[in-house]
Image: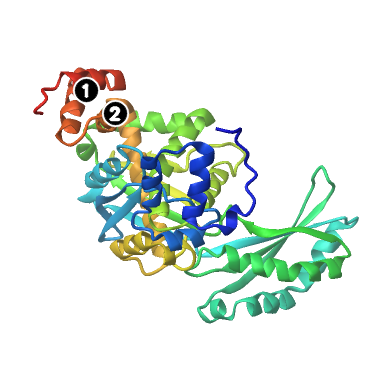
Amino acid sequence: MSELSSRIAGFHKLGIQGRLDILKERCNLDPGALESMLNTGNLPADIADHLIENVITTMNIPVGVATNMKIDGTDVLVPMATEESSVVAAVCNAARQCYENGGFITSMSGSQMIAQIQLVNITSPQFCRVTILEHKAQIKKLCDDCDPILLSLGGGLQDIEVRVIDSNSGPMVITHLIVDTRDAMGANAVNTMAEKLAPLIEQWTGGKVYLRILSNLADKRLARARATWTCDAIGGEAIRDGIMSAYHFAKSDPYRAATHNKGIMNGVSAVVLATGNDTRAVEAGAHAYAARDGHYGSLTHWEVNKNGDLVGSIEIPMAVGLIGGATKLHPTAKTNLQILGVKSANQLARIIAATGLAQNFAALKALATTGIQKGHMALHAQNVAMMAGAVGQQIDQVANALIAQGTIRIDVAQKILQDLKPDQ
């Protein structure tokens, strides 16, 4: 095989088969690999080929359904797309333990997104700031004219904010367009408005505009959820106190908070992905919000109420939508939204926040009791069995043997598999 080169003229003009033919030659792919790549599952190849560039296949991720979720008095089935063992089970168990106490109560701050316009090369930044604010009415008309449909649905520009910041490049004047994007995530809408407004800001101030793009720190689009777990439901005061200790650790230490919040995002990102929304945007916003006070801490808050019950809450930026992109094009995403039964982006965001809170409770309880590995590795044992070559009934047999031995390793699984009788 000749030395690999990443320079492939006209690669983007080829179809999926043509691209795979090139990769077969250059990367020495075997026929079995090619056959697998051509199977795009329940996402038709022609749709995949138009969603992103240079498509060669799709990556199928398991979708599970979290049960026991009662949100704002209504039972909801929550599809979750994830490859990580124990995530779906954790949400189910957490929700079951607060179900009889009312489940989750949720709310939303609004559906507003922010677009930023960066103005530089200015010597009088405060003067420029006031100048821009004087044109608020003109700015509103220009922005609303960009998207008449959004305006007809009750959305559109709601306000402007103009900030002066110091930077290594000198002072910058940053204009924020506050836009109600309704049931859309809103990136395209707010970016278009920022692009349209940029030349006028230059004209009014004599400065130079560079960046004009949305912010993923969607702190005007906060999803909130809360729930109460009684001591009886979770196993007693000692477990409650252990959960509180684990939370206080995460609140105080960014090294713990990073893993604490990753656990929250296990639930959040799984629902975001299952509904065809932008996982990277939501994750970026969440972690930025966790550091908004200058210290990276927990996205959740845990307390003990006057009855001695454990009460938890979460507040998290949630820029998700029901229209546009994969939410309308991906057949699985559309079906998952139907399973959820949501009628608005607001409702979807609140369900996602509740799922994140449930995930966090489950992780904290596991850490405060048996440790995270016992439950996680028990579910992971099936994955290890398959990695060792187990098929069919062998998967459960090998997994159960691994759990019984208390050692979840591929070498142990291979030995167990070898020892199975041929007729098994």
Place residue 295 in its image quadrant.
top right
> Which residue is located at x 30 percent, y 37 percent?
86
Residues 109 and 7: in front is 7
> Which residue is located at x 88 percent, y 57 percent?
122
N-terminal of the pair, mark 2 or mark 1, is: 2
Q: Residue furthest right?
A: 123
Residue 163 vs 310, above or below: the answer is: below
Quarter occupied by the N terminus: top right
- The residue that mark 2 highlights is 384
- Where residue 50 appears, as percent x and y from the top left, is 50, 62
Find numbered disc 2 in the image and state the secondary structure of the residue it sits on: helix
Residue 121 vs 230, above or below: the answer is: below
> Which residue is located at x 50 percent, y 78 percent?
153
Residues 387 and 257: in front is 387
Residues 240 and 200: in front is 200
At label 1, the amino acid type is Leu
Quarter occupied by the C terminus: top left
Residues 82 and 163: in front is 82
Q: Residue furthest left?
A: 423
- The residue that mark 1 highlights is 402
Label 2 with label 1: CB-CB less than 8 Å: yes
Structural crowding at the residue carrying mark 2, measured as other residues with C-alpha within 10 Å and reported as few (<14), some (14–19) or many (≥20): many
Instruction: Look at the image and tell me whether residue 225 can be seen.
Output: no
Image side of residue 266 versus residue 16, left or right: left
Q: Residue furthest front?
A: 1
At label 2, the amino acid type is Val
Place residue 236 in its image quadrant.
top left
- Where residue 241 appears, as percent x and y from the top left, is 32, 30
